[in-house]
Image (cartoon, rainbow, N blue to C red):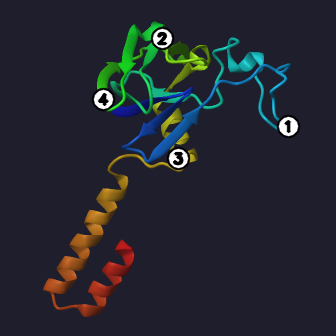
Amino acid sequence: DLTVKVVGNQWYWTYEYPDHGIDIVSNMLKEKDDPTLAEGQRYRTDADGPALLAVDNRIVIPVGKNVKFLVTAADVIHSFAVPAFWTKMDAVPGRINETWVNVEREGVYFGMCSELCGARHGYMPIAVEVWSEEKFNAWVAAKGGSMPGTETEVAAEDVESEAEAIEAGDEAGAEEAADAAV
């Protein structure tokens, strides 16, 4: 029902929704009293989740749908692990591993990189929000993405209208249909 490409980086995650045209970068939120906290940078609150597991951008998936995770890495070996989903998949540079989940309850689920990938390995949390399909669709729209099939169906209808107008010898109608397709 949904594909999410997960890419491990030193030391953050990126998530791509190829069918929806959405890319997300997810970093751990810092503690409020962290001396490295830059001016205007967002810090962790209790609403964001447990310390060391709160992130600035969570993965969002719909409840009750089969979600395929394509897991890879950009630099060194990482491991995408979400214990509540019974999921742990190595992220290896140059290789795409695959796993899937079907989550039955809405909520927020946490995980982390479970491979010793370097000095900041302990700072690669994963946070997944599981929402109803309606909320998920609204989130996709809010991120500037689109639902699969919606653009191609409209484009196909416009191309058919243009082709029909050309066959009928209606040059003005063909130009109108071509303009509508753009």
First of labels 4, 3 by sequence position: 4
Q: CA distance from mark 4 to mark 2?
A: 17 Å
- In the picture of the structure, the residue carrying the numbered disc 4 is 96
Image quadrant in which the C terminus is located: bottom left
Residue at 44% x, 23% y is: 63
- Amino acid on which the number 1 mark rests in the picture: Glu
**Could you classify mark 2 by the number of other residues whose Cα lies within 10 Å: few (under 14), some (14-19), or many (20 or more)?**
some
Tag of residue 141:
3
Tag of residue 114:
2
> Which image quadrant for residue 51?
top right
- Which residue reaches farthest front? 119
- In the picture of the structure, the residue carrying the numbered disc 1 is 39
Q: CA distance from mark 1 to mark 4?
A: 38 Å
- Amino acid on which the number 2 mark rests in the picture: Ser
Q: Are marks 2 and 1 in contact (CB under 8 Å)?
A: no
**Could you classify mark 3 by the number of other residues whose Cα lies within 10 Å: few (under 14), some (14-19), or many (20 or more)?**
some
